[in-house]
Amino acid sequence: MEATLNTFMRQQLLDRRHRLEHAAGHSDAHSHLHSLLKEVDGALARMEDGSFGICESCHESIEPDRLMCDPLVRICLDHLTGQERDALERDLQLAAEVQRGLLPRQGLERDGWHICYHYEPAGLVSGDYCDVIDAGEAGLYFTVGDVSGKGMAGSMLMAHLHAMFRTLISVRLPLAEMLKHASRVFSESTLPSQYATLVCGRAKPDGVVEICNAGHPPPLLVSRGNITCLEQSDLPVGLFASEEFSVSELRFEPGDGLVIYSDGVSEAMDPDGVEYSTDRLQDLIRGHGPVNAPALVAACRDDLTAFRAHARKMDDVTLFVLGRQLPAREFVYMA
């Protein structure tokens, strides 16, 4: 895998060099472009002598996520100068603001559906993906996913998925075709080690939900007090350029709901190293009767927070609830 990554990154550097040479021939900013060319040549030389990805200060490995974002880096995080650390912090803050701007609005209600979610990055930026798109008469499209990698690299992949699915949804492809196109584009435009687990669905005005799971933790269907773990799953998006995806169809009655979560929920640890688990999540959901989306999201969030106590957050957390609404007088809020 490491050899494949190096081959891919070498090709990316060669492409950059070609573009820089072309730009240098059509620009007056020769000194800046030649400086960039020198950096690219230096990275290519390090690949040849085996020192690529090794910190020039401590001779330990540079963080892989940083190399994926910028193959020109030569120093690990521990040995950045104060000025370089400040610049990186500003970049992370900006990326976090961009991510927050990409999240869907809370509490969307339409055609008898109510959608709420909780999105909690482990750090400044997140590799979890959550979006809701109102497609009018076609229904509500929803996507919840988790990209490989964390930090800046993960956030960039999340933004890539966001833009890609919004574009594909706008042309009204069938759900399976949309996933197939997304997987091909993702596979062809990212590193071989990068992929995304994803649940993608469409909630129709008549109470029918189309849903596809591409390697994500199984969604939980809540219906009449029963919880069904939807185990059917295809491969993650982006593993191969020619993947096929299957779509299931579910009919929701008032009070039914769908809970989608990232593994940052089920695999969260308490201070003693005990895992939160899907079983605990199911028990909590089962105790809340008919699905009231905002109440259920709040209850799950609060229980997870109490469980973790002061334990370090190891992964991003996303909780997403799609509920088929009951008449207002039938809702029971269980805090």
Image (cartoon, rainbow, N blue to C red):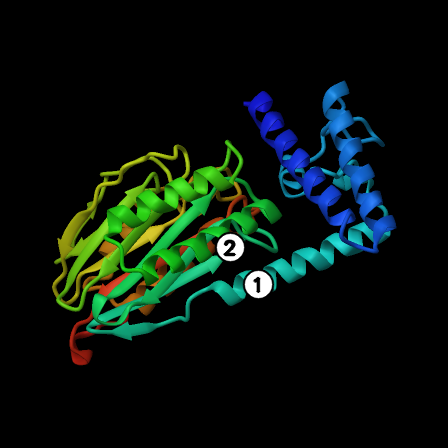
Q: Of 96 and 169, which appears nearest the observer?
A: 169
Which mark is on residue 159? 2
Residue type, mark 2 in image: Ala
**Residue under the point 19% across and 72% down:** 112
Residue type, mark 1 in image: Val
Q: CA distance from mark 1 to mark 2?
A: 9 Å
Q: Residues within 10 Å of mark 1 (few under 14, many from 20)?
A: some
**Residue under the point 39% across and 55% down:** 165
The residue labelled by disc 1 is 98
Q: Quadrant of the C terminus?
A: bottom left
Secondary structure state at the residue bearing disc 1: helix
Tell which circle, 1 or 2, labels the residue nearer the N-terminal end: 1
Picture quadrant of residue 89 = bottom right
Give x and y (percent) for residue 109: 28, 74
**Residue under the point 46% across and 64% down:** 103
Q: Quadrant of the N terminus?
A: top right
Give x and y (percent) for residue 191: 53, 35
One can see residue 288 in this view = yes
Give x and y (percent) for residue 195: 45, 38
Q: Are marks 1 and 2 in contact (CB under 8 Å)?
A: yes
- Decide if residue 172 is on the left or right side of residue 55: left
